[in-house]
Structure formats: structure tokens, C-alpha cells
Image (spheres, rainbow, N blue to C red):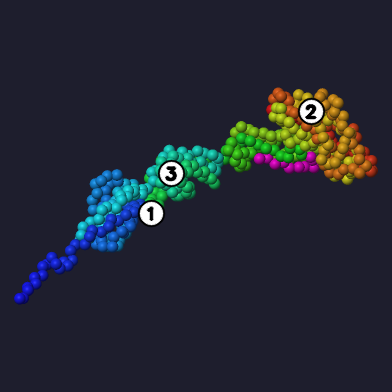
Amino acid sequence: MTLAVVASAYCKDSGGPPAAPAAPSNLTAVAAPGSATQINLQWQDNAANEDGFQIERAPGGTASFTEIASVGPNASSYQSTGLSAGTSYSYRVLAYNAGGTSGYSNTATVTTLSTPAAPTNLVATVASGSQINLAWTDNATNEDGFRIERAPEGTTSFIEIATVGPSLTTFQNTGLTPGTGYSYRVRASNGVGNSPYSNMVTATTVGAGAPSSLVLTPKSLIVDVGSTAGTTVTVQDPFGDPVANPLVTYVSRNPSAASVSAAGTVTGETRGQAVVTARAEGGSSPADSLLAVVAVPGGPVLMADIAQFSYQTNAVVTITVIMDMRASGELLGSTRVLVTWNPSVLAYQSHTNGGSGVSPTVNASNAASGSLALAMADANGFAGRVELLRITFRAGPVAGVAGYLGLATSEVAGAGTFTDLLAQTVAVTHPLATR
């Protein structure tokens, strides 16, 4: 008997549809650096049988996904382009093959980059004849910095003069020309681009300002009879900038002892002293003074190291009594000195030896009344500016009180030679006041 074998199609391997691929995972979305219109996607491919991947997008925070692209098998990245700046987008990805689609990956949401918001409230403040300070409001959270531009006043010829870092809201523009107008504008910037400009502001630097302060030096000027000595004057405007070519007048309050020229040169006329005052014309007419001491040529000068004519009330000051031997050719061997002062201007506190190694005998029993006597003798003698004594005072409590610190000597002798130098010595009285 013959058996017929009939093969059924269902008994043969038909190569049916494959299983659906595994879902991708770890989807990330990153705004592309330097671009306001691109987001870069990356994911993990967990399948070995996908024909490709479908990418879907929705407005950020919504579920309104639509397919925007597909990529081939084994792909794990995609660049989503043509987007709007500063806009949020959500993405998801699935794998597919002939057997169907995978589940979705996780959803990733990101916002495209954008240019920063414009700064506002730009203000320009004049600081001096050569500086203008800028300040503005930072309205951005994504700036890399700010660009500052300047133009001559009345023009639109702006050029960038500086950049500052993120979150900074001030800038000092220095090195400007006095009496000149400048316009400014500022914008924020980042890798995407620049913001719109801030408001524009204009400011004019201070010109060659009116005199506000004057300083005349040196405060103690020693000049011999028949000789001259120069002075230095510095005049500044209210911002501390030098006033160019100021008009300054000089006056000597005792021209018979020391005269002064229109250029501030002091001439020693006769032995004595004079207060020389310089005053600038214009502005607040500031003035300052120095004490010119006219000495015997080469002769000693008994003086104090006082560099100002007034002291703040209740200020504590230390004054050094000095015998300057100058070009006498002698060493100071002995001297007797009487120091007097107005107790309403200076109140005695204490005294100590000077810094020259001199150890004088001091009688301070009348110091409360405004006098102190000292005497010294040394066989070896002292040369140059000999510091005899340092006296500490407290300035009086009432401002505007005028007085003095006076020095007198009854003996000045050379060491070893016992040369009497008293007739060649000039002793100084320093005018003082409280302020």
C-alpha cells in the first residue's frame, strides 16, 4: 500500500514577522552651544533588531507629540534644527521594525538658547576731569558679559571700548579729556549673540577746573640774607585734578625780612622771619602759607619741626626742638633754650629726649603756664640738625584760637673751640592756631 504524504504550509518555517524591538532609554536633550535654533538628542539603543528610530516632539510641558524625523538602525543621536529661540521643547524616541514598535523612551525637555535681555537704566556720573562712571541694571540670567560702547557727544560713531563679565553692572571709563562730552550705550552678550542696546546716556567731564585747594611747600624755608630760595605750589580742582597754569599771587607779611617775587621766589633781606602766603585766583580762592626764616649766612637756626600753622582741636601732637648747625663749621657743644607757647592753643603733656643722642637738662615746672627751659653741654658736640627735645602737646579744645610756639636762646657755643655762636643764631617763633 502506498502512503501519500502531503506537506502542509503550516509545517514549514515561514519566516514570520520579527519580535518588536526593545525601547531606547536614557534620552537626553541639550541646547546646542552657540545656537538658538538647535537641540541635540542622544539615547541608548537597547535593541539588536530595529529597522530605525522615530523621533517625536511636542511643545515643552505638553503631550501633543508629532513625529518629526526617523533615523536608521543603530543610530543614537539626532539634531533637531529650525527651532525658535528661547522656546521649550519635549522629545521622545521609539524603535521600530517589521514586527512593530517599541515602547517610548523617557521624555526629555529643554529650552533653546537665546540672546540675553537688554540692560536698562544706564546712568553716567562724572567723577573727574578724566573719568566717567557707568552703572546699569542687569535684566539677563544668561549673559556671558556686557559690551560697553562710546561715541563723541552728538554723534553716532560708537565703538566698543571695553567688556565686563556676567552680573557686573558698573564700569569706570578713565583716561578721558577734560571738558569733553561722551555718549555711552551697553548691551549684554553670550554665545548666541548680543542683546538690544540699553538706553544711551551722555556726560561731560569736568574741564580745567576752578581752583579748590592749594599747597605751598616747604613749610619751613631757610634762606640766608642776600640769597634766594624757590617754593613749590600745587593747585587742584574739586576732583583732585591739577589745575593747569593757575594764576597764583604771593605775599610776604614781613617783606623787610623776606620778600617774595611773582613767581614765588623768596629773597632773604634781613635776619628774621616772615610768613609767605600763596593764593590762587578763581574758584574758592584757596591759599596756603609757609614760614620763611632769614638766617645769617651759614649761621645756626633754632627752630621746631612744625609743618602746619593750625591743629585740629584736641589733637595730640609732638614737636621737636632743633638746632640746625647748617654751614657754621662748628659742632654744637652747649646751648640754653627757652620754649614758650600759648596754653590756649597748646597744652603740655610730656617730653622726651630728641633723636640725636642729646640728653638735655629740662625744667618743666612752668609747663602748665606755657614755658619750658632746657640746657645741654657735650664736649664732643653734635653736627647737622641736632634734635634737642621732643615735646608732646594736646591742641586746645576751642577752634579759631591764635597763638604761637616761640624759641629763644641765651647760649650757643661750639664744642672744643668754645666759639660763641649766639650772635650768628636765629631763633624762630612759629605762628599757630586751632581749627
Residue 205 visible from this viewpoint = yes
Q: Position of residue 103 (x, y in %)?
A: 26, 53
Is residue 228 on the magenta stretch?
yes
* Residue 127 found in image quarter: top right
In the rendered structure, which amino acid carries the disc numbered 2? Answer: Tyr
Q: Residue at x 67, y 33 (%)?
A: 287
Where 124 falls versus 398 (above or below)? below
Q: Earlier in the sequence, mark 3 or mark 1?
A: 1
Give the left or right position of residue 307, taking residue 197 as reference: right
Magenta span of residues = 222-234
**CA distance separating discs 3 and 1:** 27 Å
Is 426 left, or right, of 310 in this rendering? Answer: right
Whole-percent x, y for residue 52 in the image: 25, 60
Q: Residue at x 66, y 40 (%)?
A: 234
Residue type for callout 3: Arg
Q: Which mark is residue 33?
A: 1
- Sequence-wise first label, 2 or 3: 3
Examine the rendered structure and indicate whether residue 90 appears above or below residue 247.
Answer: below
In the image, 315 versus 229, the foreground residue is: 315
Query: Which residue has dot 2 on it?
Result: 348
Badge 1 amino acid: Pro
